[in-house]
Structures are given as C-alpha cells and as structure tokens.
Image (cartoon, helix red, strand yellow):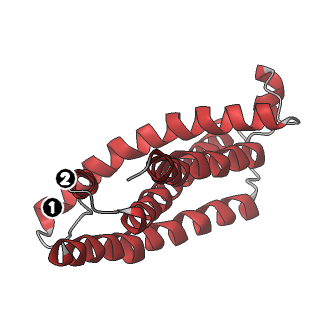
Amino acid sequence: MSEVEGLAKFGLFLFLAFILPGMIYVGFIVLYFPQVFNYLGWDLSSWVGFLGLTVFFGLTITSICFALENLLYYAIEKLWKKLERPEVIKLGIFEAKNKSTFYLNQVVGQYICHFNIFMGVLLLTLFFLYSCISGGILFIDALKLIFGITISVVNFYLSFGVFRRWSVEAIKRYEKEC
C-alpha cells in the first residue's frame, strides 16, 4: 500500500467518523442555540472558524457518543446475544496482511458516522428540550424538535439497520476471500 492510499483511507475514515458528524453538530447548535457562538466569540463566518468548530465539536461529542455506544452494546449483549458489531480491529489485521481495505473503511466509517450523528443529534435535541423546559419557556419550537428527532431516528436506522449489517457482512466475506 502506498503512502497516498494509506492517507486517503485514513482521511476517509476520519472524515466519516468525526468531521462530517461535527458539521452536523455545528448545524444543530446553530439551530438550537444561535446565541452561544456570539456569546463565546466563535466566528462561523469564515471557513477557518467553521472548520475549527467542526473539529472541536466532532471530536468532543463523538467521544461521548463512542462511550454511549459501548455502554449500549454492553446492555444489548446481555439481552440479545445475536446482535453483531463490526470488528474495526480487523481492518488493521487485513492491512497487516497487505489486503486493501478501502471499501471496508468506507462502510465501517458510514456505520460510525451515522451512529455518531444519531447519538449526537439526540443529545443536542434532549439538551435543547431541557433548556426550554428549565428556562420556563412554555412554547417550545416544535418544528426544531421534530426535525432533530427525525434526523436522530433516521440515522439510528441507517447505523444499526443498514451500515452495521453491511459492515459485519462485508468483514465476514472479506475474511473468506482472504
């Protein structure tokens, strides 16, 4: 594998796992809490400011999502033994055997991406709801809540229903071929 190919795979994985969810988080923070950026002096009017906040929120919120994902799988494994999770470590094993994993990086990255968007948007939506209720706001912007819940539910389905299954199946088939 060339350095360029390795960097491309690593970049794709990082983009899907952290950067793209970070962009979504920044969008929802602007939607739910538009005053927070001005209050903290963060500038979204430049690409540098947007990219910086994307990386900051992408890494911060997805770390919370990753911890919650592990807790969620631990709880689910106690109930259902059959729920399989993509074994990300196998990407490294295939690479060590000089097997290209570009497709696996993409499909596993999509699983992580959609899980992070699901969980991150859900957390932001719940925080928005809590801030409205605790702030004494009787009228909660229902469209914002419906939008946040919809995006969260869709990404939950894409993560667990589509990309989790595709990732697990792709890794199994890849093992057979190798």
As helix, strand or loop, the secondary structure at mark 2 comes to helix
Residue holding disc 1: 77
Q: Tell me if mark 1 has few (under 14), some (14-19) or many (20+) residues whose alpha carbon lies within 10 angstroms of its own.
A: few
Residue type at mark 2? Tyr
Question: Is residue 43 shown above or below 132?
Answer: above
Q: Position of residue 84 (x, y in %)?
A: 20, 68
Of all residues, the one furthest to the right in this rendering is 45
Q: What element carries label 1?
A: helix
Is residue 45 shown above or below 12?
Answer: above
On screen, residue 122 versus residue 73, left or right, reads right
**Left or right of 134, for residue 61:** left
Q: What residue type is labelled 1?
A: Glu
The image shows residue 32 at horizontal and vertical percentages of: 73, 46
- Which label number is shown at residue 11? none
- Report which residue position mark 2 lands on: 74
Of residue 108 and residue 144, the one placed in the foreground of this image is 108
Whether residue 128 can be seen here: yes
Q: Distance between the residues labelled 1 and 2?
A: 5 Å
Question: Tags 1 and 2 in contact by the CB under 8 Å rule?
Answer: yes
Nearer to us in this view, 174 or 49: 174
Q: Where is residue 162 in the image (x, y as percent from the top left)?
A: 41, 77
Q: How many marks?
A: 2
Pointer 2: residues within 10 angstroms few (<14), some, or many (20+)?
few
What residue is at 70 percent from the left and 38 percent from the top? 136
